[in-house]
Image (tube, rainbow, N blue to C red):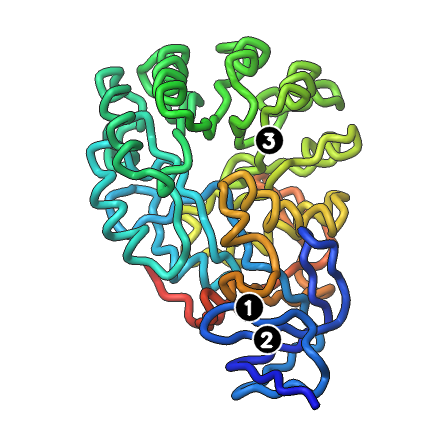
Amino acid sequence: MNNSTFDLLIHAGRVVCPRSDHDSPGSVGISDGRIAAIDPPADSTATETLEFPDSVLLPGLVDLHAHPACSGSKYGVDPDAHFLTRGVTTVLSQGDAGADNWANYREETIEGSRTRVRLAISISRHGESSERPCLDDSDWLDVDSCVEAIADGGDLIWGIAVNCSRASSGATEPRLALDRALQAARSTGKPLLYGLREPDDWSFTEQLELLRPGDVVTYTFRREPHGIVAGGRVRPEVVAARQRGVLFDVGHGMGSLDFNELEAALADGFPPDTISTDQYAQHVGSTPQHDLPRTMSKLLAAGMPEADIFCAVTSRPAEILGLSDQAGGLRPGAPADLTLLTFRADAPPLEDVHGTARPGGCFEPVLTLRDGERFAPEDTASN
């Protein structure tokens, strides 16, 4: 006789764990905020049972580039209201805080949120708190202060954010900004989350040669000539960087996902390592809502295999963040961070940042669990 009993038992049409290659109809048992069993015996009992026959259950989604911030960032959005309710249980901030406002960011956003938040700290002391471009004044690029903040933050600070694009560099020479970020990275052993400068200002070859294995390039699929594709093929310097261990992230945002660019890269055998939203304040209240499930859907419509997409929003970003023991997989004893998605084949066409459309349906969030606590899309609040 089976004596398995749980606080909560969730049955789903598919239970998928990219880390373990599990993909089948099944169930997950949860007790005390942790995963107690995967596919427990059929006669298991629970205080409460939920049925989702038309949904896929995944490890909680991980967004490697977005703007979770409860205050202090012009781009910031409340992570519990705008990520956790949309399927994301772990999110990395791209430079919302710098050394001067790091302590407040830790207290308000990292420690004050149910969402698991990590920071790529800005090389600028001010992060995104100024209305000016974040790197606009070279005096803001303070290596010593950045290093001190990282020592204080420990594992809560994953790495260093430096976006050398024209929009973020402002009046600062981008070579100087990257050099300062690399100095801080070498001193602390941290990786970079890097936004490339437009190639007509500074060649991609020169920029990429400065990056190291484990550094992450984001905004990967900008429209040519500012993206990784030239003449329908992935630039050879980009391929060489990946071969050296540099990683490539989507960073969709409002200017960095072009369907033609993405489709050319996928056809050339160059999928992203991770899929991220670059979701920020301007997306709040968008129709349809910009979120990670919708971004995943655009990769699917462009031809990226579903299994690779699931990996790129769960196990792979969790591994990059050093959180494989906490996120990105389904295993007994792990935090009960789960995402349930449904696929609407009849959803309106998907659009890239330029309004180019592709048909194909859309993943939509149904329910998110963080340490066993439930969050639904209708819990989304205005920010």
**Image vertical order of residue 157 relative to residue 292, above or below:** above
Amino acid carrying mark 2 in the image:
Gly
Residue 37 figure quarter:
bottom right
* CA neighbours of label 3 inside 10 A, class few (<14), some (14 to 19), many (20+): many
C-alpha separation, residue under disc 2 versus residue under disc 1: 6 Å
Looking at the picture, how far across and down is residue 282, in whole percent?
A: 40, 47
Closest to the observer, 180 or 359: 180
What residue does disc 3 label? 248
Q: Quadrant of the C terminus?
A: bottom left
What residue does disc 2 label? 29
Count of marks, rendered view: 3
Q: Residue shown at 28%/32% (left/top)?
A: 151
Q: Residue shown at 53%/32% (left/top)?
A: 218
Closest to the observer, 79 or 294: 79
Looking at the picture, how far across and down is residue 293, in whole percent?
A: 59, 56
Amino acid carrying mark 1 in the image:
Ile
Whichever of labels 1 and 3 marks the residue nearer the N terminus, that label is: 1
Q: Is residue 339 left or right of residue 96?
A: right
Whichever of labels 3 and 2 marks the residue nearer the N terminus, that label is: 2
Q: Secondary structure at mark 1?
A: strand
Q: Quadrant of the N terminus?
A: bottom right
